[in-house]
């Protein structure tokens, strides 16, 4: 079920910033997951009710919910829906249902590690619960409490990332960002955008330059929209204008998010991030990556081991439904690229700033 509201009717945020809640649970154990359908922005504000696993899976796969932290939160709540709706009245069948739903949701997208982290946490918590077996409604309620904790912890981590990240952003400056890393992509305040919001709350005068982020234009459709709603000065630029904007001295820092970070600091983020990092290096501009500790995959030594999602060629050849390329042309459409650690000035986490970016520094900060 969906509910639609004209975007023009939205409340204009004032400082301190009030985040847009894009992912939330409504009600008690018989409730549902509500998602802000990001495929409909900026034209419409549409909220999608998810009452079963299939709807959550489709929402993740089709980018109705996106951003690594938000995907993790949605998957946690999706686990509750799957177990609640399963015909499981005893411990073995309940655990089988738990395994089935977490396995299914894990297939939704391959790159964002928060998805797998949240599902594994829900699976482990469910198995722990099963040792103290109770009736299904109580078991579901406790699993829902764990999903709420994942959501609340992400919100707290984003606030902390904002505080650390704001330290790196100079006053009276321009900051470039790529893709969307705000409240639309997280439980509440954002990662890279949290640093910008916090810096503005501290009285720093900052203008954001938002890459449009081809081919799905998350920077144009989502970041520019979100920043406008918050009253943040924002200038939208084409992806291939970033070099010129840097050359003109308009940008003092670049800050982006990440979907997975390897043990050595290599960071996977939306396609185009690697290019922005190279440009920043050439123009001697600091390049920061902001992400919670749950985005680190320390089992992977380098970014070469990060799986890169390949998406539908029609996203390139038929942008938003209109043909923009000849029929049957070959298309390469990776959703992400990997920025090597040597191009990253610092990693910003809820536990502190990691600098220099290497495996030793990461291990020290993350513990």
Image: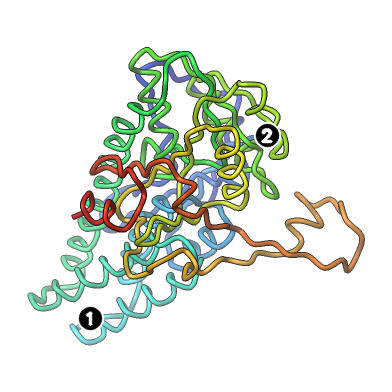
Of callouts 2 and 1, which one flags the residue occurring earlier in the amino acid sequence?
1
User: Relative to residue 105, is residue 334 drawn left or right?
Assistant: right
Look at the numbered disc 1 and give the secondary structure of its residue.
loop
User: Observer-nearest residue: 151 or 312?
Assistant: 312
Query: Residue 205, located in which quarter of the rendered image?
Result: top left
In the rendered image, residue 341, in percent from the top left (x then y), is placed at 44, 53
Nearer the observer: mark 2 or 1; the answer is 2
**Rounded to the nearest whole Å, what is the CA distance between mark 2 and mark 1?**
60 Å
User: Relative to residue 317, is residue 356 drawn left or right?
Assistant: left
Count residues near mark 1 (Cα–Cα under 10 Å), then give few for <14, some for 14-19, many for 20+. Answer: few
Identify whether 74 is placed above or below 223.
below
Count residues near mark 2 (Cα–Cα under 10 Å), then give few for <14, some for 14-19, many for 20+. Answer: some
User: Observer-nearest residue: 214 or 41?
Assistant: 214
Give the label on residue 89, or none: 1
Kindly identify the residue that appears in the image at 65 percent across and 64 percent down.
Answer: 311
The quadrant the C terminus occupies is bottom left
Give the label on residue 55, or none: none
In the rendered image, residue 117, in percent from the top left (x then y), is placed at 32, 64
In the rendered image, residue 281, in percent from the top left (x then y), is placed at 55, 40
Kindly identify the residue that appears in the image at 50 percent across and 63 percent down.
Answer: 55
Kindly identify the residue that appears in the image at 40 percent across and 44 percent down.
Answer: 186
Q: Mark 2 points at which residue?
A: 243
Kindly identify the residue that appears in the image at 20 percent across and 67 percent down.
Answer: 137
In the rendered image, residue 58, in percent from the top left (x then y), is placed at 54, 63
């Amino acid at each position: 079920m969906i509910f639609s509201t004209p975007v023009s009717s939205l409340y204009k945020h004032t400082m301190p910033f009030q985040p847009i809640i894009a992912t939330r649970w409504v009600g008690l154990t018989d409730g549902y997951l509500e998602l802000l359908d990001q495929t409909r922005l900026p034209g419409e504000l549409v909220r999608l009710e998810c009452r079963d696993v299939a709807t959550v899976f489709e929402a993740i796969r089709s980018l109705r919910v996106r951003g690594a932290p938000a995907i993790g939160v949605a998957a946690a709540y999706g686990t509750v829906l799957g177990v609640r709706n399963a015909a499981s009245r005893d411990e073995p069948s309940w655990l089988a249902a738990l395994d089935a739903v977490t396995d299914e949701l894990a297939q939704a997208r391959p790159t964002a590690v928060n998805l797998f982290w949240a599902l594994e946490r829900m699976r482990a918590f469910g198995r722990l619960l099963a040792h103290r077996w109770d009736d299904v409604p109580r078991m579901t309620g406790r699993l829902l409490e764990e999903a709420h904790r994942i959501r609340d912890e992400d919100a707290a981590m984003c606030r902390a990332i904002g505080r650390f990240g704001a330290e790196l952003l100079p006053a009276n400056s321009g900051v470039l960002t790529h893709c969307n890393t705000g409240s639309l992509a997280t439980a509440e305040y954002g990662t890279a955008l949290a640093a910008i919001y916090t810096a503005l709350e501290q009285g720093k005068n900052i203008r954001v330059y938002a890459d449009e982020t081809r081919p799905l234009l998350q920077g144009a459709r989502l970041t520019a929209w979100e920043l406008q709603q918050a009253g943040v000065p924002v200038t939208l630029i084409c992806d291939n204008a970033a070099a010129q904007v840097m050359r003109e001295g308009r940008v003092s820092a670049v800050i982006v998010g990440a979907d997975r970070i390897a043990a050595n600091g290599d960071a996977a983020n939306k396609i185009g991030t690697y290019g922005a990092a190279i440009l920043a290096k050439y123009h001697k501009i600091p390049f920061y990556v902001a992400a919670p500790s749950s985005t680190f995959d320390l089992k992977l030594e380098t970014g070469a081991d990060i799986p890169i999602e390949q998406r539908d060629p029609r996203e390139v050849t038929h942008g938003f439904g209109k043909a923009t390329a000849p029929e049957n042309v070959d298309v390469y459409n990776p959703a992400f690229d990997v920025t090597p650690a040597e191009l990253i000035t610092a990693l910003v986490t809820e536990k502190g700033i990691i600098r220099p970016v290497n495996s030793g520094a990461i291990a020290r900060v993350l513990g």
